[in-house]
Amino acid sequence: MKLNLAIDPDIVALMAAEVAAGERAVTAAMREAGTGLKSAWRGQITGAGLGTRLANSIRSASFPKSGESLNAAALVWSNAPVIIGAHDAGPLIRSKNGFWLAIPTLAAGKSTRGGRITPGEWERRTGLRLRFIYRRRGPSLLVAEGRLNTKGRAVASRSKTGKGVVTAPIFLLVPQVKLQKRLDLARDAERAVDGVPGMIVANWLEAR
C-alpha cells in the first residue's frame, strides 16, 4: 500500500504569512501606543495649566523607523525633563546656598530673560534697593520704597514730596518650598502598556 500526503496550502508559505501579519500587527500596535501616550501626557500638562509650550516638549518615536518587526518598540520622552519631572514628583526645593528662596510677588514683575526675576536683577532694573524684614511667623520679606504703577509693579517714585510712596513687598523669603504634584505620568504609561496586547490582537486580525 502506498500513501501520498500533500498539504495545501503550503505550510511554509502559511507560516511566513502569519509571521508577516504578526510583524505588521506588533509594529502598528507600538506606534499607536506611543502616539496615544504622547497625546495623554500632553493632555495632562495642558489640563494642569502648564501651557502648550511645555506640553509640546513631549515627543514620541517608534522603532524600527521603517518596515515591520516583532520586536517593534515605542519611546515617549520630554525635551524638558527637569521641569516635567518636578511637576510629576512634587519635590522639596531648597536654596542652593542654604539660605533663602526668593519668591517674587506681583510687585516684582517678570524677568526680561524669561522665568522668575531675581533680587539682583530687580535692583538693577529699577534702581531701588531692597530691604530685608525678618518675620518670626510666615515668610520674611524683601521690601522696597517706591510707588505702584497701574499694573501693580513697584517702580521708582519721581515725587519730590514723597506722595504715593509705599513700602511694597517685592520678594517672599522662605527656606524651602514643596512643589505641588500636578502630573501623574506613570498612570498614563501603565494604561498604555496594559493596552498593547489588545492592540496587537486587533491589528493581527486586520492584517490577516
Image: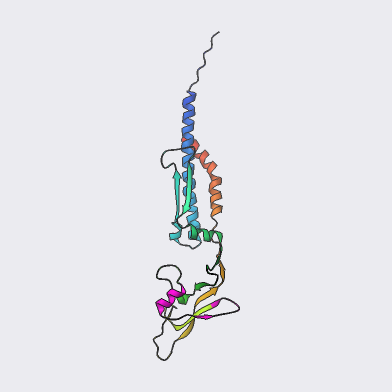
Q: Residue at x 41, y 40 (%)?
A: 66
Give the number of callouts.
0
Quick one: 132 or 85, which is closer to the camera? 132
Residue at (53, 12) in percent of width and height: 3
* Image quadrant occupied by the N terminus: top right
Question: Relative to 189, does residue 154 appear above or below in the rendering?
Answer: below
Between residues 185 and 130, which one lies in front from this camera angle? 130
Q: Is residue 42 above or below residue 126?
A: above
Q: Position of residue 138 (x, y in %)?
A: 58, 76
Identity of the residue furthest to the front in this view: 97
Q: Is residue 130 magenta?
A: yes
**Residue 62's x, y, as percent?**
45, 45
Q: Is 153 positioned to the left or the right of 181 in the image?
A: left
Extreme residue in the top direction: 1
Does any portion of residue 208 appear in the rendered image?
Answer: no
184 drawn magenta: no
How was this image coloured? rainbow
Between 133 and 28, the one nearer to me in the picture: 133
Seen at 51% across and 57% down, the residue is 44
**Numbered range of the magenta stretch:** 118-140
Q: Is residue 44 above or below residue 139?
A: above
Point out the residue furthest to the bottom here: 161
Which image quadrant is residue 160 in?
bottom left
Q: What is the x, y in percent for residue 185? A: 53, 55
Residue 197 visible in the current orientation: yes
Depth check, front residue: 91 or 62? 91
Q: Position of residue 183 (x, y in %)?
A: 53, 59
